[in-house]
Amino acid sequence: MEFLGTLVIILITTSLFGHLASRVGIPAVIGQLFVGIILGPALLNWVHANDFIHIFSEIGVIILMFIAGLESDLTLLKKYLRPSIIVALLGVLIT
């Protein structure tokens, strides 16, 4: 039952802070990351990293990448492909 309570706390607070961040004018992800810092071991230590949290975090990353892929625009990718490759190569070669 502890897992369900932890999941409910995470879902409610991230949804709330994500919505509040959007209303303020910053990306919702910033509000959600802020909740992770507050609830995690950095401040309140209410949510502990265990196998349950690890599995759900992996699922969340997969869903986030899927949504990012759905929102990708291939015409913009083609338009900025050459400049992005140049910047990436220069970043690797200079460092």
Image (spheres, rainbow, N blue to C red):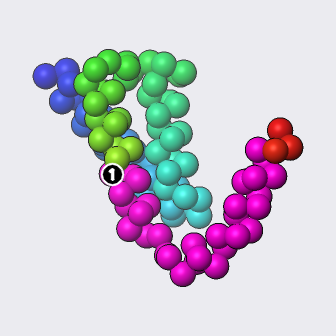
Q: Amino acid at mark 1?
A: Ile
Q: Which of 10/56 is in front?
A: 56
Give the residue drawn at x 33%, y 51%. 63
Magenta-colored stretch includes residue 42: no
Give the magenta-colored segment's residue range: 63-92
Q: Which of 73/50 is in front?
A: 73
Where, quadrant-wise, is the N terminus in this rendering? Answer: top left
Instruction: Please say whether residue 18 is visible from this viewpoint.
Output: yes
Instruction: Please say whether residue 10 is visible from this viewpoint.
Output: no
Give the residue drawn at x 66%, y 73%. 80
Which x, y percent locates residue 32? 46, 45
Say which element carries label 1: helix
Give the residue drawn at x 44%, y 28%. 39
Q: Is residue 88 left or right of residue 3?
A: right
Where, quadrant-wise, is the C terminus in this rendering? Answer: top right
Give the residue drawn at x 54%, y 21%. 42
Magenta-colored stretch includes residue 71: yes
Q: Is residue 44 left or right of residue 47?
A: right
Label 1, on which residue?
63
Q: How many marks?
A: 1
Task: Give the answer, above or below, for where 40 lies relative to 75.
Answer: above
Q: Is residue 46 left or right of residue 90?
A: left
Q: Which of 15/89 is in front?
A: 89
Which x, y percent locates residue 77? 57, 73
Snapshot quadrant of residue 49: top left
Q: Is residue 71 left or right of residue 43?
A: left
